[in-house]
Image: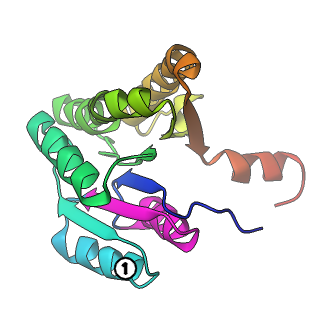
Amino acid sequence: MKIDLIGKKAIVAGGSRGIGRAIALAFADCGAHVSICARGAEALAAARADIAAKGVTAHAAPCDLADAEAVARYLAEAIEALGGVDILVNNASGFGSSNDETGWEKSVAIDLLATVRAIRAVRPLMEAQGSGSIINISSISGLRASARTPPYGAVKAAVIQYTLSEAAALARKGIRVKLHRTGLDRISRRKLGKA
């Protein structure tokens, strides 16, 4: 099935590798213009080139999503480069695995606050146009005990709750806010005996 996103403008925060890169390339395959950000310049440049090869506008910029000013600057640049925004994907994660101040600060800053700040940046434009889609990437870790990665699990649970709250608040303004939880499909298949 081919999804038609021709001319749509998509921003993927954390889009240079893994899930974020796959999302960005899928948008480009469907005809969307795409902007990505990440910290690693080499992976960012490679992902941007792969997006551009699809024949769409490809914008990429380095951004430390733990830095509030950097998030605002990146989103302003991305919106200008694309000529607007129709889709925002909050994919980045600090993967806070250590149960100490560093692990907690990293998870809160990148997984949660970067998501809040990015939505805050695109919301006025989406409200003005009366449409938009926001997708927040969470994890199965936000729904069950996460003994090895307590900060990651707790913050992903917060992302789930925040997404539900934003979905309720923005639906009447024509903006869809959705959640994707990584790991659920694999677990569901296993429980159904299909893995």
Q: Quadrant of residue 56?
A: bottom left
Q: Quadrant of the C terminus?
A: bottom right
Residue 115 appears anywhere in the view = no
As displayed, is residue 71 above or below residue 18? above
Question: In the depicted view, which residue is nearer to us: 144 or 30?
Answer: 30
Q: Identify whether 189 is placed above or below 58.
A: above
Q: Within the magenta stretch, is there residue 95?
A: no
Residue in the picture at 39% in, 63% down? 34
The quadrant of the rendering that contains the N terminus is: bottom right
Which residue corresponds to the image point at 50% horizontal and 33% vertical from the top-left? 146
Question: What coloring was used for the rendering?
Answer: rainbow
User: What's the residue at 72%, 68% (across, down)?
Assistant: 2
Q: Residue furthest front?
A: 129
- Total labels: the figure holds 1
Q: Which residue is mark 1?
A: 52
Estimate the x, y position of residue 134 in percent, counting from the top left: 48, 38
Q: Is residue 86 visible?
A: yes
Q: Would residue 86 appear left or right of 113 to someone viewing this image?
A: right
Q: Nearer the viewer, residue 131 or 105?
A: 131
Q: Between residues 128 and 98, which one lies in front from this camera angle?
A: 128
Q: Position of residue 42 (x, y in %)?
A: 20, 77
Q: Which residues are magenta?
A: 17-37
Residue farthest along the left direction in this orientation: 69
Instruction: Measuring from the top left, give residue 49's x and y in whole percent.
Output: 32, 82
Amino acid at circle 1: Ala
Q: Is 19 included in the stretch rendered in magenta? A: yes
Is residue 194 shown left or right of residue 28?
A: right
- In the foreground, 93 or 191: 93
Q: Secondary structure at mark 1?
A: helix
